[in-house]
Image (cartoon, rainbow, N blue to C red):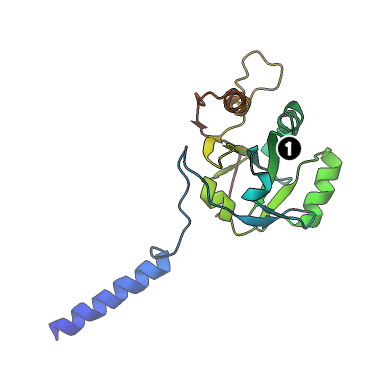
Amino acid sequence: MGGKKLQHSGISILWICLALGLFAQTTPAVDIGAEIGNFRLMDEAGKTHTLRTYSGRIVIFVFWSYKCPSALRYTNRIDVLQSKYDKSRIAVVGVSTGDNENAAGIRANKDNLGIDFPVLLDPGGTLAAILDATHIPSVFIIDEKSRLRYRGAIDNDKKIGDGKRIPYAENAVEALLSGRSVAVQEIEAKGCIIQP
């Protein structure tokens, strides 16, 4: 009798754990300095991208959304990242994570805003989970050997030209281009929360 109660309790605990997702398979986030795994995502134009697409280049993944006011405020600062560096050495790639945006909407808003970098569609949040992206806008800088070197805020939320602006992302890129280690490797991003 006591054995049956114990077995029943064990089954109940198992069902509770399953309901809470405690045994769910999740993609572990990559630590700073670790190599990120390959991925396969399509952009808003229907082109397939993998990490190997950018082999030998520094990649700046920008989590972006045309529905996020914070991201829209950063459009010109993202443009600077796109235009400042030699495209043969640096690739800026947008990422739209979650399922609340579609390719047609991204294309239309890219045209309106004059954005010319590709935006990857990450509806299942695979890339967001790998990089541990929590907010929009935020950037993740990968070196030529596919290792994560910077994660977080683009800057300290000061406009370009403001003497108090700290350009975290640009500083990280400059360090990598110069063969130096990145001094500030992670700064908490703020903005729109990425929904899991």
Identified by mark 1, the residue type is Leu
At a point 52% along the width and 40% down the height, the residue shown is: 147
Quadrant the N terminus occupies: bottom left
Residue behind mark 1? 72
Residue sticking out furthest to the left: 2
Say if 157 sits above or below 142 in the image.
above
Give the camera-side residue of 125 and 30.
30
Quadrant the C terminus occupies: bottom right
At a point 53% along the width and 51% down the height, the residue shown is: 37
Q: Residue 50, can we see it?
A: yes
Q: Residue 68, can we see it?
A: no
Residue 181, position as x, y percentages in the image:
50, 26
Residue 63, position as x, y percentages in the image:
64, 43
Q: Is residue 20 left or right of residue 157?
A: left
Instruction: Assess disc 1: are there few (<14), some (14-19) or many (≥20) residues with their C-alpha within 10 Å of its C-alpha.
Output: some
**At numbered mark 1, what does the secondary structure look like: helix, strand or loop?**
helix
Say if 151 sits above or below 128 in the image.
above
Say if 188 sits above or below 2 in the image.
above
Image-quadrant location for residue 89:
top right
Give the camera-side residue of 183 and 109.
183
Image-quadrant location for residue 110:
top right
Residue sticking out furthest to the bottom: 1
Residue 102, position as x, y percentages in the image:
75, 57
Q: Is residue 196 left or right of residue 123?
A: left
Give the camera-side residue of 75 and 49.
49
Image-quadrant location for residue 153:
top right
Q: How many marks?
A: 1
Residue 94, position as x, y percentages in the image:
69, 44
Residue sticking out furthest to the front: 56
